[in-house]
Image (cartoon, coloured by chain):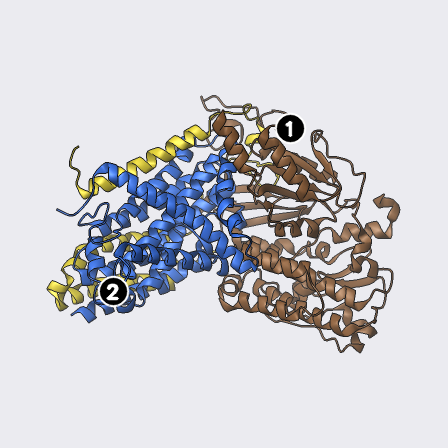
Chain colours: A blue, B brown, C yellow
Amino acid sequence: MRPYVGAEVALLATAAALVAGVYLVAVLDRFAAALVAGAVGSWRRLLVVPLAAAAALLVQQRRTTERPDGAGWAVAPALFFGLAAFALALVPLGPDLVIADPSTGFVAFSAAIAFVMIAVFLHGWSPNSPFALHGAYRYGAAALSFQIPFLLAMLATALPAESLSIVDIVRAQEPAWNVLRQPLGLPLYLVVGVGVSFWGPLNLSDASDVAGGTSVEDSGVARLLWTIARSAMLVAVAAMGAAGFLGGWWGPILPGPAWMIAKTGAVLLAILAAGHLLARVRIATFVLVAWAVLIPLALLNVFVSGAILL
Amino acid sequence: MGLTALLARVATGAPVPVFAVAGPGTRSLIRDLRLRPEIRLVDTPRPASVLLVGGLVPAEMEMAVARVHDAMAHPRATVLWSAGAAGLGRPEGFDDAIPVDGDPVAACVAAYRDILVGRRGSEPPILPDVDPAPWRGVGPYGQGGSGMTGGVPYGRPMAELGPDPDGLRLDVLPVAVGPLFPRFPAGLVVDARLAGDLVLEVEVANLLANATAAAPSPEADPFLRALGERVAIADLELARARAHLRSVAEALLAAGLEALALRALRIAANLRAGDGALVRRLATIISATQVLRWSLRGVGAVPPEAVAGLGAGPVARASGLREDLRLEDPAYRDLGFAPLVDAGGDAAARLRLRLGEAVQSLDLAARAGARAATATGRVETPRGRLEAESSASERLFTVLPSLLREHEWGDVVATIVSLDLDLEEGPLARGRARPEAAA
Amino acid sequence: MVALGPLAVSFAVFVAGFAVVLASWWLGGRPRSPAQTAPERVPFGGGADPRVHAWNRYHVRYYSMALIFLAFDMEMVFMYPWAVVFVREGLIAMVEMGMFITILLLGVLYAWRERALEWA
């Protein structure tokens, strides 16, 4: 039997990790933006403003549109957040510190990533608004393009582990982290990981040229929940990146969980900083690049790392 | 409700979500408000709490302002900012709005605090509660009558089938965007027929065309002054560099790079003739990642023959045309001025050219000394040739639909942003030529 | 307490996250202000009045890419177990999967040549 904890502990631990992670995303994002803009304000402001902005959305009315799909609109952020929590619960902090480690952990994580497309499309479809609908279909194109490179980049990490369990994948990185053994893996994973939570250069569905895309009609608690769900998914993707490619808990001196948290933070900071430096790509160009460049590269990564193992 | 009151108090520490409407003459003033950390300019009115209206909105746009006002969530307030021109009228229906002459940001912050803690009631809707299409079909949801797509389900018709370049017949969605779409200049309405994400047919309208621009202080704009008098080249070139940087900031915003846009705006706000190195550094950051160039390459291609003779300024020069009124000015010839030209012709080329021209203008401003430009009744503004009758952006309007047709919506937005249309130049110039009309 | 397997525990996390957000949505949307008027519900189009409903028979221009995706997604189903036994089976696994992938990649090349991956 694979290790796991009781349901109460699992819920509390995931909730704590998500609260901390989402807050960290909000603070790091502001910090990275301030660095790029060339004017870092006071630390106090940096730490307090995200909380105040959340409170501001909580006291705002939640608006509706003409004949929306009300149920779909409510379910979209719930599904997105649930998937993020599910994905995060699969990532181990240490060899024994894991909420749940099914033997098919990697497949379960991939399934969560695949389902995100439904959540985002539903979110864009529901308000019956042209810009939101446009964002939804854009996400469809982006998601269908990055799913395969995402899976292939992750799959390469399962080869040395000879297992689909995330704990085994991390354990197999004791001699050398995957980022060294499969140098193509992490960049590929990050490109598509950013796409899953549509951040920065791959923020096609909620972009500024469609006035906010799928979230154009969101106000109040709806907007807050959608932002939280997006950030939570980013945390899950960063944590899995740290586990799958950066050696998870392996590292000198510090205890394993500290390494895991530090690595997740580093991946998050890299993603958020890149979001403020890299322009949004064109959807048509991205689709072409995903199929003509990313998938062949990801396959090359799989076969080269396989050949090394033989 | 103790919790609501507590949340409201915490919320007063948040940047005020503001949806800003720039009336003629206030465009760059509104854009620069992005630099103020106390407020946050949002792209859609839904999450906005304060509607900030700068200057006098022309009658053609009043309806749009009212719609945007009603789209805002409660609690909400409106701030009418005179932007320096006292005694402005207020748009119809905005009886509860807060007029302000001084700092609009302070007024927004105060208004936001007041509506949060309940010192001020949330504004009621302006438009009457009338259904857009009261006719309903025979079915329980208003559908039917002449079929789902032929009837008026839910009080609005559905899109109809139409031909498509792919040879299929699918729905063609008629969508009008503007005049308050955040990426477009205020007053621009793009009336598109969309098949999927592709713009099949497009018409554009300029709602500022007949505006009597009660400009806050037309004398502050050196290009407007240069229409009738000799203006120091140093002033003109500094203003040109500033305008180019603001245009670059708009392009960065459209590309999702808000932080870099703030950097550009900050440089523009404190610009001095010796800041060439700052601008060059900005250009290095923008080009270092290559992604912006990659995503703008081939977008919004302007063939030189389409804009030849329009005096389209940077747009023409980025398409390889050597069009610049400064070439005819002996004062500029004296400085050894030669226009920058880029053969690219696309949005990437226009961005590159504007950054280059900003550096060039700062260099000219530093070397100009006391030289003044010759007054000829026409002037090369950052958008091109400005005359008392028409501006470069207004003349570009004639070719605009041909540049947008059969492109993806994102490319359409990127194209319009890269053209840096300025619809207020024309009304301001005309108001200057006929002062009685502006009064 | 009932002993759940690891998958069931992670699924419980999903259900809890889903329920918490759904409840917040409902709690945060209780009417605190008068019902919205018709103009207040109009979808945002930059201040313009929409002429039709946004929902339409949308021309999904990437449909051919979506079909290729289906083929690759099926391939992924085979690759999961393949990754587990890869080291044990050795070269034969590599060659077999290599052949399979090559055929699929030829399909992508064909689609690329036919400009099926481009639009707009």
Q: Is residue B221 above or below residue A129?
A: below
Question: Can residue A60 be seen?
Answer: no
Q: Which mark is residue A302?
A: 2
x and y percentages locating residue B331 in the rendered image? 82, 73
Which residue is depicted at the point 29% across and 63% down?
A: C105
- Per the image, label 1 sits on a secondary structure element best described as loop
Query: Which amino acid lies under the numbered mark 1 shown in the image of this protein?
Result: Leu
Closer-to-camera residue (B375/A183): A183
Q: Which mark is residue B127?
A: 1
x and y percentages locating residue B419 in the rendered image? 64, 58
The answer to whether the residues at label 1 and label 2 have Cβ atoms under 8 Å apart is no
x and y percentages locating residue B106 in the rendered image? 67, 42
Q: Is residue A140 left or right of residue A110?
A: right
- Per the image, label 2 sits on a secondary structure element best described as helix
Q: Is residue C57 left or right of residue B418?
A: left
Question: Can residue B281 be seen?
Answer: yes
